[in-house]
Image (cartoon, rainbow, N blue to C red):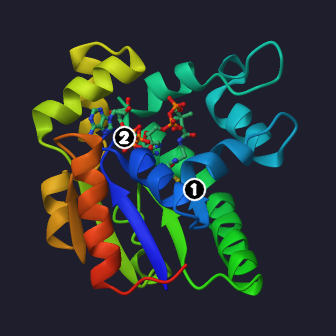
Amino acid sequence: MIIGLTGSIATGKSTVSRMLKNKGFPIVDADEIARLVVEPGSAVLKEIAAVFGEDVICPDGTLDREKLGARIFTNEEDRGKLNAIMHPAVRSEMIRQKQQWLDEGAKTVVMDIPLLFESKLQSYVDKIIVISAKPAIQRERLIARNNLSESEADARIASQIPVSEKEKQADAVIHNDGSLLETEKQLDSILFGWNVKL
Ligand SMILES: CC(C)(COP(=O)(O)OP(=O)(O)OC[C@H]1O[C@@H](n2cnc3c(N)ncnc32)[C@H](O)[C@@H]1O)[C@@H](O)C(=O)NCCC(=O)NCCS
Ligand SMILES: Nc1ncnc2c1ncn2[C@@H]1O[C@H](COP(=O)(O)OP(=O)(O)OP(=O)(O)O)[C@@H](O)[C@H]1O
């Protein structure tokens, strides 16, 4: 079974993904892959520099994530351009990693894909878990984690489909508004209900 884990920014995908990893499930992490494909010297990074300018590259050759983030989260056209450059590379690496786990005999693979609905990747997975948090809590956690202003946080939240919309298309929803223990209990009950095997 391929389980897709999604939600909206800062609702707790990585938190739940970590819980699943601790239980022994293999994880394919789209955010981690998105960092991998822009390593210094990569073709994807060269294309980003060609489109967005050399000033999005740090003196040490790495991507200036803060600078690029400030542009793409406030400008839909720029976001579309970045997605067009990065997503094909991210998608093929996600599929490669998933296949590798299956070839190694994994019965279940978890794919943590923040933009699963925005990128229409529902067909990549068998079941979808949406990690949700109330808007005020989501905003508060995003501001605290990324040290953003309120307007920067709002721009990031607005760059994605609202989590309430995603919930409607989920096979299961985890409400991550309370303690981590409460979140893990919801996760365990979903895994039990679906008879998920390691
Ligand atoms: C713009 C970048 C450099 C900002 O880096 P930063 O370290 O600040 O953020 P990070 O990569 O940790 O992403 C945090 C969250 O932002 C959201 N997010 C990232 N990219 C996008 C996007 N293109 N559109 C909407 N939301 C996005 C996701 O919820 C993600 O979990 C980076 O997010 C990036 O390379 N984005 C493009 C690749 C992408 O679409 N990644 C999302 C999953 S494939
Ligand atoms: N139940 C919880 N109680 C308190 N804090 C939490 C809880 N769940 C998550 N957090 C915190 O909220 C922040 C966002 O969580 P997390 O990083 O897991 O979200 P995410 O959905 O993976 O975000 P992104 O879309 O940016 O990758 C983190 O700082 C995390 O430690």
2 or 1: tag closer to the N-terminus: 1
Q: Is residue 138 visible?
A: yes
Q: What amino acid is labelled 2 in the image?
A: Glu
| Of the pair 160 and 36, the residue shown nearer to us | 36
Q: Of residues 34 and 3, which is closer to you in this image?
A: 3
Residue 170 visible here? no
- Few, some or many C-alpha atoms within 10 Å of disc 1 (few <14, some 14-19, many ≥20)? some
Answer with left or right where residue 154 lies relative to residue 73: left
Mark 2 vs 1: CB contact within 8 A: no
Whole-number angstrom distance, CA of label 2 to CA of label 1: 24 Å
Q: Residue 29 carries which label?
A: 1
The residue sitting at 17% across, 64% down in the picture is 167
Front of the two marks 2 and 1: 1
SS at circle 1: strand
Above/below status of 9 relative to 141 = below
Quadrant for residue 103, please give it: bottom right
* Residue 76 numbered tag: 2
- Counting from the top left corner in percent of width and height, residue 135 is at 13, 38
Q: Residue at x 39, y 71 (%)?
A: 120
Pinpoint residue 144: horizontal percent, then vertical percent: 32, 18
